Image: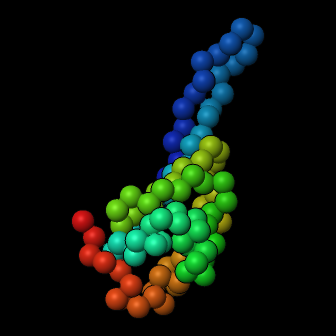
């Protein structure tokens, strides 16, 4: 899942309002990764699985979910490529790798 939040900054003297954007991404994993993957953090764990973490996102592993955000517009095509690569990498991991989620 990916989405974008838009807010408007209050105008300052002589300037118009302008939008500010935050982009969010969320991946549901098939279960909890092993403890050593949790310790290394999501970006490094994704690389360890052979994937590439999306650049510029502050990623966090929350139970069996990877969530991230960054300032700026959502780049849907780029995120789709990251998500598809990650899905292929996850599908290639043995089911015994994952622990049951919460």
- Camera-nearest residue between 66 and 37: 37
Classify residue 63 as left or right of residue 38: left
Whether 92 is drawn above or below 74: the answer is below
Percent x, y of residue 95: 35, 88
Examine the image and state in which quarter residue 26 appears. bottom left
Percent x, y of residue 76: 60, 61
Whether 74 is drawn above or below 102: the answer is above
Q: Residue at x 35, y 72 (%)?
A: 32
Percent x, y of residue 30: 35, 77
Q: Residue at x 53, y 83 (%)?
A: 89
Whether 25 is drawn above or below 6: the answer is below
Q: Residue at x 50, y 79 (%)?
A: 87
Whether 16 is drawn above or below 31: the answer is above
Quadrant where the C terminus lies?
bottom left
Quadrant where the N terminus lies?
bottom left
Examine the image and state in which quarter residue 91 appears. bottom left
Colour scheme employed for the rendering of this structure: rainbow
> Total label count?
0
Using the rendered image of the protein, determine whether residue 27 is visible from the camera's viewpoint.
Answer: no
- Camera-nearest residue between 53 and 42: 42
Percent x, y of residue 67: 46, 57
Classify residue 43 as left or right of residue 1: right
């Amino acid at each position: 899942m990916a989405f974008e939040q838009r807010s408007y900054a209050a105008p300052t003297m002589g300037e118009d309002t302008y939008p500010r954007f935050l982009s969010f991404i969320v991946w549901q994993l098939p279960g909890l990764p092993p403890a050593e993957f949790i310790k290394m953090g999501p970006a490094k764990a994704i690389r360890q699985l052979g994937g590439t973490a999306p650049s510029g996102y502050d990623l966090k592993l929350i139970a069996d979910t990877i969530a991230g955000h960054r300032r700026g517009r959502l780049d849907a095509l780029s995120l789709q490529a990251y998500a598809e690569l990650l899905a292929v990498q996850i599908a290639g991991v043995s089911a015994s790798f994952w622990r049951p989620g919460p």
